[in-house]
Amino acid sequence: MNDTATLAHRPAAQGVEHFDVLIVGAGISGIGGAYHLIHQSPGTSFVILEAQETFGGTWWTHKYPGIRSDSDLYTFGYRFKPWTGKPIATAEEIRAYMGEVIAENDLDRHIRYGHTISAASWSSAEKRWTVEATRTATGEARRFTCNFLYMCQGYYRHSEGYTPQWPGMENFKGPIIHPMKWPEDLDYTGKKVVVIGSGATAATLIPAMADKAGHITMLQRSPTYFRTGRNAIELADELRKLQVDESWIHEIVRRKINYESQVFTNRSFSEPEKVREELLGLVRAALPADYDVEKHFTPSYRPWRQRIAFVPDADLFQGISSGKASVVTDEIEHFTQGGIALKSGEMLEADIIITATGFHMSVMGDIAFTVDGAPVDWAETVTYRGMMFTGVPNLAWVFGYFRASWTLRADLVADFVCRLLGHMKAIGAQQVDIGLRDEDGDMKILPWIDEENFNPNYLLRSMHLLPKRGEKKDWAHTQDYWAEKDEIPQIDLTDKAFRYS
Ligand SMILES: Cc1cc2nc3c(=O)[nH]c(=O)nc-3n(C[C@H](O)[C@H](O)[C@H](O)COP(=O)(O)OP(=O)(O)OC[C@H]3O[C@@H](n4cnc5c(N)ncnc54)[C@H](O)[C@@H]3O)c2cc1C
């Protein structure tokens, strides 16, 4: 180990820019990561490379009517910046909030928009990553080097959504639209619209389109759980009346929400039947008395095996109650010129079909990784707490929570990255490798996520491409915010799992 070398201030090759840290992606995780680097690792040079022409990630890519969060912004917002609006927020409001973080911390000068990264190669001899990017607008190739790669690229491909192929799709006379590619000029006034899918996207689109459309139908293969309630947090409103400082309100409301969601999550494991009845009770209360809740809103799985979307002010159910929207639970046989033929024999007429059928997982931003010349197969790696990976030095990934807001984890991972960089600097290390310890030798190696625990289709489709987890919690993304909030800050950086050189 070279005592004088630190992570910072090493020269770049000609025409190549060098940074201590290169952040991939200017979504909520990347912008948060940059904030934490500035405040927790002052003096660290960094750049954010972002493929799109602006910041926002998910909240820029998706432009369909009504696009909004399905978790509250007190916890989806950053720990360090109070949220002062309604808990469920539109994409525009989320971007405005992120824009303030950028402006208040002068982050713009660190971001290079329109840079798509295609390859990253680690050299143990040079102790650095070489990152190949392409200027999206001009096709110009750009090369960067960095000591540490901070992967904030999310988990799905932004360029296109996932659309299953059904027989006869080519015969349908109207547009078939994936919500990720919403045509700005789509006029659906008075039109018959069918939305395939029943996740958060469908639940958002349907109330937003119901008034203008002639009729809108949610076509689902199987039902999903929803939660409903007012789009307000009484405690926050009360504290505001008392003129409590917004930073206090933010912290207090976060604690309340996190406490309540922990209780809810624990109950969904300890008494799933009760939780199920409560969720269905909310749905029943929002729909007409004779509505077939059993058929259309009663999932076969236990609560929380898939994300539960929040429906603010029961707007989805209001649309159904008013007759402007309806739900069909059936399977697609084939598309016809005028709509969809269902397996039950029924025909669903449509002028426009929207495929709210999810996304393609993107493992590490579809970047081709090599380490010392050998291609990285992520499925061959084992994760250290869902953040780092065996055989891949100097790299951390932000993968958030399913049952709690994503950003809670983005903040925790950022704290960890800053602490790790500080530790490396302190001991004069330039490389950190993650490796299984002797005592992990007979540990079972398993898929990234336990299907029994959480099983949305996009994950199941891509599980074979994702890193592996181990049986012990050090070697897994446990999805347990309530344990990780205490455990991640206490990770012992001198543990044998971390090998420094
Ligand atoms: C419609 C929708 C609604 C959601 N609502 C919620 C919610 O309410 N609550 C919640 O907790 N989670 C929600 N999620 C999950 C959501 O994706 C995350 O919460 C969060 O926004 C992810 O932020 P991120 O910054 O990690 O990734 P992203 O938002 O995916 O941003 C990643 C950025 O990295 C860039 N990038 C990727 N690859 C490359 C590359 N090779 N080169 C350069 N740039 C690259 C992308 O262009 C993108 O801008 C939602 C997801 C979707 C799709």
Image: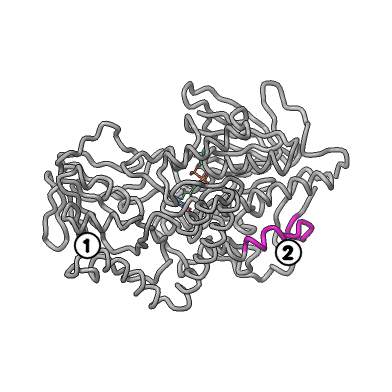
- Looking at marks 1 and 2 on the same chain, the residue that comes earlier in the sequence is marked by 1
Q: How many numbered marks appear? A: 2
Please say whether residue 487 is one of the residues in the magenta stretch. yes
**Along the line of sight, the residue nearer the viewer: 103 or 301:** 103
Res. 234 mark = none
Q: Residue furthest right?
A: 3
Query: In the image, residue 240 lies at what x, y percent?
Result: 51, 51
How far apart, in angstroms, are the residues tagged by discs 1 and 2? Answer: 50 Å
Left or right: where 105 falls relative to 438: left
**Residue at position x 35%, y 61% in the image:** 228
Query: In the image, residue 52 lies at what x, y percent?
Result: 47, 32
**Magenta span:** 484-498
Give the residue at mark 1.
329
**Along the line of sight, the residue nearer the viewer: 348 or 383:** 348
**Along the line of sight, the residue nearer the viewer: 138 or 247:** 247
Q: Secondary structure at mark 2?
A: loop
Residues packed near mark 1 inside 10 Å, few (<14), some (14 to 19) or many (20 plus): some
